[in-house]
Image (cartoon, rainbow, N blue to C red):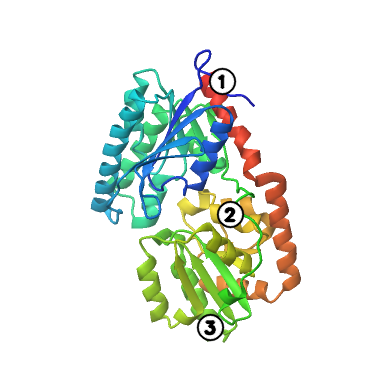
Amino acid sequence: MESMTVSAGRKCRVLIIVENLPCPFDRRVWQEAHALRDANYQISIICPTSKDYEKRFEIIDDIHIYRHPLPIEGEGAIGYLMEYSTALFWEFVLAWRIYFTRGFDVIHACNPPDLIFLVAIFFRLLGKKFVFDHHDINPELYEAKFKRKDFLYRLMLRLERWTFKAANVSIATNQSYRHIAISRGKMRPEDVFVVRSGPDLKRLKIVQPKESLKCGRKYLVGYVGVMGKQEGIDYLLKAIQYIVYTLNRRDIHFGLVGGGTELTRLENLAESFEIEDYVTFTGRVPDKDLLELLNTADICVNPDVVNEMNDKSTMNKIMEYMALGKPIVQFDLTEGKVSAGESSLYAKKNDEIDLAKKMVLLLENEALRKEMGEFGRKRVINELEWRYEAPKLLSAYDALLS
């Protein structure tokens, strides 16, 4: 499918701005960049540096990546203000640098935070288009982190409205987000496109299990994700404690992959629960190690807390589990059910004991595990893989440029 060009003989040039993760580590953004590049768009990306992604500029797969320092990882209102201010400064600087060198016709902003529109509105005055790629619902994310709806929550709602108002086109990751764009953001339905975060089976490959990851135990439960407050790892650790000491199961190990601001606290919590021998925290690891662990896992778990944020959000980890044919246990979340369907068991909302019982139930039923895993992988292959979503992204751009 050919992209539309801005003028005869010239590619449409897209500047993608993402703050919360570097590229190519941010899988959704990297898949979008490749889909647009393959459709003959010229792609530049502004993103932060981080461990393993420290080069301030590099070209990967003909995509120009401009990285900026982000020394402060936000924790609390003041921390986030400093982080976002620093990021916004560098996004302005690098956007002007790209404008005067490679140029761009479209700014494609990926939240969080809902501040990147402040960069985009300057360039809209110069005739550039603005695409808002709605990754997270920030008012709900704020409420999930800080347990309150105060002045800052109301500010988040206002920033979200201004972002939608500034956008020519909005991209939603699911139907719940599309509804927010239309109802809360007042966007026209025809300007909101659903592009789900489909897994890439070229990356998520089935490989041989590595039995040593089970640490001598019969079963392994896998988890991959951010170690943050709203991810529900506290519930998972309580469930593990219940499995080990109440159900008296010593034959199950748990592998938790991912980094984040809560990692040290969660490691300490596992020690206080006296379950550290049954849990491996890997931190952030390369894809090779992640795939080895998930392929070794007998089941995978998603302990995301039931709240407004998680109920409306599509979690990439669910898709990755399904892509590898892994049966899942998670809490009863609306979009979690939409994604996983029959490939998952659903525990009562925020009930760690039911989560524990569902995990043990699934581990003890090999036939059910096989059936659920096959359902999930077939659904990814036939419906949810990224190759089904890329054309929807290109349709959004066709509408933007037509």
Q: Residues within 10 Å of mark 2 (few under 14, many from 20)?
A: many
Q: Which mark is residue 244?
A: 3
Q: Nearer the viewer, residue 296 or 347?
A: 296
Could you tell me which residue is drawn at 35 percent across and 61 percent down?
A: 261
3 vs 1, front mark: 1
N-terminal-most mark, 3 or 1: 1
Real-space Cα distance between discs 3 and 1?
Answer: 58 Å
> The disc labelled 1 sits on which kind of residue?
Met
Locate residue 392: give its quadrant: top right
Real-space Cα distance between discs 3 and 2?
Answer: 27 Å
N-terminal-most mark, 2 or 1: 1
Q: Which residue is mark 2?
A: 336
Could you tell me which residue is drawn at 53 percent across and 83 percent down?
A: 244
N-terminal-most mark, 3 or 2: 3
> The disc labelled 2 sits on which kind of residue?
Gly
Q: Which mark is residue 4?
A: 1
